[in-house]
Amino acid sequence: MSGIFSARAWNKVWLYRKTFLVGLGNTLETAAIALVIALALGIIFGLMATSGKKVLKAISRVYVEFFQNTPILLQLCFLYYALAFSGHSPGILVPGFTALGVYTGAYMSEVIRAGIESVPKGQFEAAQSQGFGYISRMVHIILPQSIKVILPPMANTIVNMIKNTSCLYIIGGADLLSLTYSFVTGENTGGAYAPAYLLCGVLFFLICFPLSTLASAWENAIKKRDRKEVV
């Protein structure tokens, strides 16, 4: 019954379609909360990296290098089991979106740092000469100019984060991939492997492909506009 052309398998998937929709909803919920965490950490550590202060830059660098160079699965398992063995386990969702947020925050930080550094130094000097403090310079002058550089790679980072929600499967989450696995191995629902995993992939594709396309189109439009400005 597991064949991709099995009418019986597809019928079973259709009958239990709410399972996949619940998984999709949980994936989007986890991604949304993780995104808030990632943006907050990205802004904080991105500003620290461009603050010009060696201590803050060093702290930002350690954060970025550590989380970018260790697997998200390892970070997720460590957080989940550390909380579980401490006797303060908050369930699966909290370690899930926390680990995803902290991991993605390291990439957001680099995106924001690169965006800030793309602004000509003359803008920093001009703002400073006008009496703007560091935060005021960033909020009113630098970040508005760097946003066009930040947004396209940020969209790609969000796409990767959505795909990384599938890592919650390792701790028995309720995300899309986890519920798909539960479906294909369930006593009453098992067997429809190919249709179930195909549907899971299609749902991920329907979320991620438009975002990736938007990011690429946005980046190409910016490059095109910049070339016209140079000419």
Image: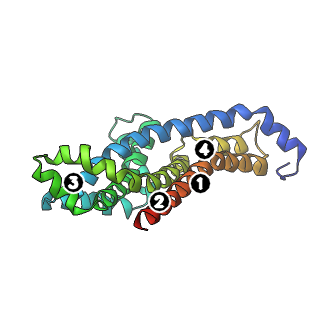
Q: Residues within 10 Å of mark 1 (few under 14, many from 20)?
A: few
Residue tagged by mark 1?
213
Residue tagged by mark 4?
178
C-alpha span from label 3 to label 4: 37 Å
Left or right position of 219 against 194: left
The amino acid type found where label 4 is placed reads Ser
Which of the two marks, 1 or 4, is nearer to us in this view? 1
Residue tagged by mark 3?
48
The reply to whether callout 2 and callout 3 are in contact (CB within 8 Å) is no
Q: Position of residue 182 (x, y in %)?
A: 66, 41
Q: Position of residue 121 (x, y in %)?
A: 22, 62
C-alpha span from label 1 to label 4: 27 Å
SS state under label 2 = helix
Q: Residues within 10 Å of mark 3 (few under 14, many from 20)?
A: many
Q: Position of residue 172 (x, y in %)?
A: 54, 43
Q: Position of residue 77 (x, y in %)?
A: 43, 51
The amino acid type found where label 2 is placed reads Arg
Which of the two marks, 3 or 1, is nearer to us in this view? 1
The reply to whether callout 3 and callout 1 are in contact (CB within 8 Å) is no
Labels 2 and 3: the sequence-earlier one: 3
Left or right position of 143 against 7: left
Label annotation for residue 21 = none
The amino acid type found where label 1 is placed reads Thr
Which of the two marks, 2 or 4, is nearer to us in this view? 2
